[in-house]
Image (tube, rainbow, N blue to C red):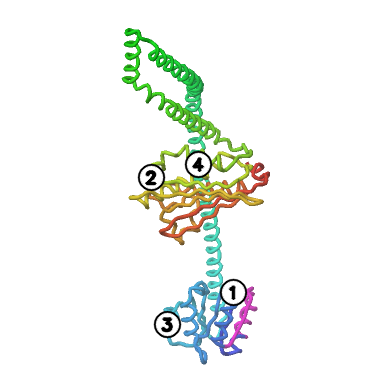
Amino acid sequence: MKILIVDDSKFNIEQAKKAFEENKINCEIEACTSGSNALKIVDSEEIDIIMLDIIMPNMTGLEVLAHLRSNPKYRDIIIIMFTSLTDKEYLRKSFELGANEFINKPIEAIEFTARLKAAIKLKSNQLALKDAFRMLEAKNNSLKSTTLKLKEMQFQLIQKEKLSAIGELAAGVAHEINNPLGYISSNHETLGKFLKSLKTILVEYRDLIDNIAKSSHNEELTNDINKIKENESLLNIDFILEDIDDLMNDSRDGIQKVSKIVKSLRNFARTDNEDEYNYYNVNDIIDETLLVIKNEWKYSITIEKIYGDSPDIYCNRGQIEQVILNLIINSIQAIKEYNKDQKGNITIKTTCDDNYTYTSIEDNGPGIKKDLLNKIFNPFFTTKDVGKGTGLGLSISHDIIVNKHKGELDVKTEVGKGTIFTIKLPLTKINDAIEEN
């Protein structure tokens, strides 16, 4: 406990110190003889109790008291007015300005000890209350942090279960489609060979008919040939022969697209394996993600892909796919909300250098306000309406890229023009990421 005695009389200061010693009040004591010096000491040191003389030259004790109580920094200092005045008006004004107690001069031992001990006890209780409040605040912050982590874990568990269920459904659908697709593809290839043979023989039949028609004078045979030609005209055989190759090519393209969708579904079905790290190509992951969510963007957004020659990276495919999915869905939703009457644009670009791959997802949505930029990766922070967002998509994406893959997730934005998220991933093997998982 540190006590400051402020009195313009050195005799009074010595008397006060003597009273401390005689009554065995164990405190650190400091003294000064003016109000201005008292303010300097209080400003530079931690003072618990001030014994303040009311009447002093240049700056009175009441002025010092008023100055101290006007500053919230000093509101917890216990102030005891030290006075020989008998005018009660001074005491009334002292208490109005915020004094806690008073001691009369000359010092009377019993009164001095009683009032001072009461002030020390008050300060001790005050400090104990502060400590208790700090402990309560720390526990409250810890509880908030734990609650936040539990909510995040709960969300991640729910998402994991959802992804697992979706993965199982995707695997089942892919399997069911893949079987008929196999024989459709095989039959299409066989049908193509058959049609080629039929076209060849049909051309030869036509040549034969033409030769017979030129050399034969048999009226009945001529009538049969003319009937065949009429039927060819009615059945549009010439058009069929011209169009059949295009039909076969279109069918082949359709089969390839379905096959690609099935492959993407099968890959997506494996995205819930958190421990599976291997070498994957970011461009392939982007293509498969866009294919799975195509229905979200195909009617309202134009997506431009600018792919560099990116090497394979060592990563968890499902987690990286989840990040790209989150970022693209965020861009799609922002654009749909912002560009309601026109098509939006998203540009996905991949590049690399000697150490990292870079994937940027740029949209022409509304952008993000500067005062929100430092909050977007916080768990449960969202600018979406209630019920439309959990505020965990970017938080989880940041955790996946930064903590689990030792990369970086950066954002650049301009209000009214759009946002660019850039994923930076190392080309080297991430041993630490595996150990953490």
Mark 2 or 4, closer to the camera: 2
Disc sitting over residue 154 in the figure: 4
Q: CA distance from mark 2 to mark 4?
A: 33 Å
| Horizontal arrangement in the rendering, residue 329 relative to residue 319 (left or right) | left
Disc sitting over residue 46 in the figure: 1
Tell me the amino acid under the disc marked 2: Ser
Residue 382: x and y, percent?
A: 44, 51
Q: Which residues are magenta?
A: 14-33
Q: CA distance from mark 2 to mark 1?
A: 65 Å
Residue at the disc numbered 3: 93
Placement of the C terminus among the 4 image quadrants: top right
- Does residue 393 sit above or below 270 in this rendering? below
| Horizontal arrangement in the rendering, residue 295 relative to residue 126 (left or right) | left
Which circle's residue, 2 or 1, is located before the other in the chain? 1
Q: Which class describes the residues within 10 Å of circle 4: few (<14), some (14-19), or many (20+)?
A: few
Residue 205: x and y, percent?
A: 43, 15
Which circle's residue, 4 or 1, is located before the other in the chain? 1
Residue at (43% x, 53% y) in the render: 364
